[in-house]
Image: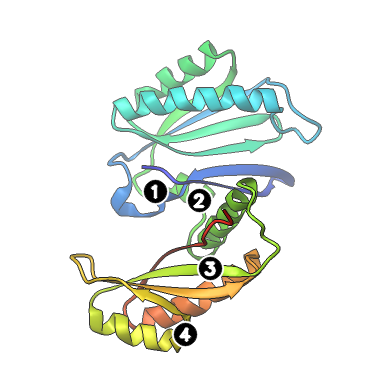
């Protein structure tokens, strides 16, 4: 289970790129492992900003797939990566003895290993330092979704229907929220099942990050009053 998101941040006065598995923000879906493995690579070709070149990026991605396979086989999980000037770190949660195996995989792929280590981290503090949460996490999800739409060739310069989904514990609270959302903004109320009732609202706007954020924030505040949980947004394709 994975939902990888990316963002940039300042790291020691220099730009850094963080990729993290947002699914692990939920403690219920975290791997049952209290050991954090850090694998730091160096010595690869960098661009002017100290980030991996495109060709190195491809090699790092291939290594990432191998590391994930090795971790998965032992009940571990790759949690995040951190690219900063001249170094690239893989952060995983897995049995401690896998740190050596991860380093060996990196060397076999042609990378220089600057360091590798395993340390107790039952609260997943290393992951928390890199992962986003709350509004920052939802902003990152919005940004990723808009980039995917743009890559798919969708026209993001025109106003379109944007659908927001919420789950409620029961039909009564779902109906109350549906009314509070504002009449015509409701597209449909889903059927009640074991997980409650789903309400979908429709918002017409040019899909910018600011517009999506503002409407998501407004609707989420309303939904919270009725025990609702935000599940995401989407839009119909142009074609």
Q: Which of the marked residues, 4 or 2, is nearer the chain's N terminus? A: 2
Kindly indicate whether the residue at mark 4 contacts the one at mark 3 (C-beta within 8 angstroms): no
Residue at the spot of label 4: 184
Q: Which of the marked residues, 1 or 3, is nearer the chain's N terminus? A: 1
Pointer 1 local density, CA inside 10 Å: few below 14, some 14–19, many at least 20? many
- Note whether 141 is above or below 170 in the view shown: above
Quote the CA–CA distance across marks 4 and 2: 37 Å
Relative placement, left or right, of 95 versus 42 is left
Q: Secondary structure at mark 1?
A: helix
Residue 79 lies, in percent from the top left, at 44, 40
Rendered image quadrant of residue 193: bottom left
Quote the CA–CA distance across marks 1 and 3: 27 Å
- Note whether 155 is above or below 176 in the view shown: above
Relative placement, left or right, of 68 versus 31 is right
Furthest toward the right, the residue is 48
Q: Residue at x 41, y 43 (%)?
A: 2
- The circle on residue 229 is none
Quote the CA–CA distance across marks 2 and 1: 9 Å
- Note whether 135 is above or below 141 in the view shown: below
Quote the CA–CA distance across marks 1 and 4: 36 Å
Residue at the spot of label 2: 131
Residue at the spot of label 3: 162
Nearer to me, 92 or 228? 228
């Amino acid at each position: 289970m994975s939902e990888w998101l990316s963002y940039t941040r300042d790291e020691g006065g220099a730009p850094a790129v963080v990729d993290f598995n947002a699914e692990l923000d939920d403690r219920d879906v975290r791997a049952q492992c209290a050991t954090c493995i850090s694998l730091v690579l160096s010595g690869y070709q960098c661009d002017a900003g100290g980030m991996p070149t495109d060709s190195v990026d491809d090699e790092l991605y291939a290594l990432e797939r191998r590391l994930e396979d090795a971790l998965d086989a032992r009940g571990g999980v790759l949690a995040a990566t951190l690219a900063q000037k001249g170094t690239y770190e893989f952060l995983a949660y897995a049995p401690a003895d896998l740190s050596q195996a991860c380093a060996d995989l990196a060397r076999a792929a042609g990378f220089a290993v600057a360091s590798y280590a395993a340390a107790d981290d039952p609260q997943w503090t290393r992951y928390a330092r890199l992962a986003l949460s709350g509004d920052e996490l939802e902003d990152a999800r919005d940004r990723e979704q808009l980039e995917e739409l743009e890559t798919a060739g969708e026209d993001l310069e025109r106003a379109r229907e944007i659908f927001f989904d919420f789950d409620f514990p029961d039909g009564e609270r779902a109906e109350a929220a549906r009314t509070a959302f504002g009449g015509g903004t409701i597209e449909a109320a889903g059927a009640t099942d074991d997980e409650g009732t789903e309400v979908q609202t429709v918002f017409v706007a040019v899909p910018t990050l600011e517009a999506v954020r503002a409407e998501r924030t407004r609707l989420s505040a309303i939904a919270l009053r009725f025990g609702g949980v935000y599940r995401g947004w989407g839009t119909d394709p142009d074609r």
